[in-house]
Amino acid sequence: MKNRNTIFAFVGGALLMLLLFLALKSFKPKNEDIQNDFYIITNQIKKMNKMVVVEQDFSSMQKTKVTSQIFGGLLPNMEKEIVTFTKTNAQVSYDLNKMKIDVDSANKKLIIRELPNADIKITPSVEIQNMDDSFFDRFNENDLKKIQNNAKDNAVKTVNQNYLRDLGRKQLSENLSQIFVLAKALKYTIEDETGQIDTTKL
C-alpha cells in the first residue's frame, strides 16, 4: 500500500511538472518570437553583405599590317606586320553593402527598398606574338602603343555587356533567394519596391 502511494505521488508530481511546463510555454511572450525572427533574418542579410561577381575570360589574335613610304616615295612602299594576342577579363559585380532591405517583424514583412546597380569592369591585356619589319622600316614605340590601344579598344567592343548583366542578375537572384526562402519559412510576405524582382514566383 505504501509503495502504491509512492508511485501515485511520483506520477502525480510528474504530471504536475508537465502541466506547468506546457502552461509556461503557452504564455511565452509573442515579442520573443518577433525578436527571434528579426534576428534570424537580419543575420542572414548580414552574411550576404559582400560582393557578388560573375566573370568571363576572352582571347583573340589580331594581325595588323602597316604600309609606309621610304625616302619620300623614292623607293617602293614597304609593308610591316605585327601579330598581337589579346586576353580580356570581363567582370560584373554587385556591392551588396549598398542593398537596402527592411525587416518589419511586427507585420511580418520583408521589404526590398533598393538593390545595387551592376558595375562592369573590362580589363584587356595585349601581348606581341610576332613582328615582321625591316631594317629600313621598324615599328617604333608610337606604332606599338597605337596598335596595342586599338587591340584593347576592339576587345572592349566585342564584350557583350548585356549578356554579362543578365548573368549578374541571375547570380544576384540566387543570392537573394536564400533570404526569401528563410522569410517564407517564417511566414513573412515579401514586398519589392525596386520592380526588379517578380515576387509572384517566390
Image (cartoon, grey):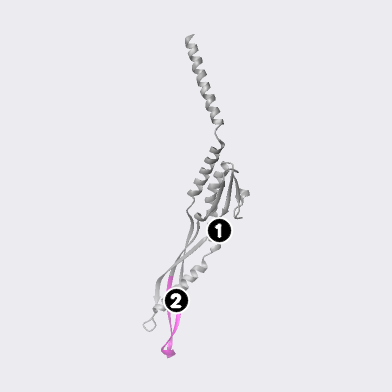
Q: For numbered disc 2, what is the local secondary structure?
A: helix
Tell me where residue 122 appears, x and y as whole percent: 48, 65
Quick check: 51 above or below 155? above
The front one of 78 and 98 is 98
Q: Residue furthest left?
A: 135
State which tag comes first along the sequence, 2 or 1: 2
> Which of the 4 image quadrants contains residue 135?
bottom left
Q: Residue furthest bottom?
A: 74
Q: Is 112 one of the magenta-colored residues?
A: no
- Circle 1 residues within 10 Å: few <14, some 14–19, many ≥20: few
Amino acid type, mark 1: Asp
The front one of 48 and 26 is 26
Q: Main secondary structure of the magenta part?
A: strand
Tell me where residue 69 appears, x and y as whole percent: 44, 86
Tell me where residue 118 appears, x and y as whole percent: 53, 60
The residue at the point 54 percent across, 47 percent down is: 179
- Rounded to the nearest angstrom, the CA distance separating label 2 from label 1 is 33 Å
- The numbered disc on residue 146 is 2
Quick check: 56 above or below 141? above
The front one of 107 and 160 is 107
The front one of 62 and 158 is 158
**Residue segment shown in magenta:** 64-84
Report the number of discs. 2
Q: Is residue 196 left or right of residue 43?
A: right
Q: Which residue is mark 1?
A: 166
Quick check: 30 above or below 125? above
- The numbered disc on residue 66 is none
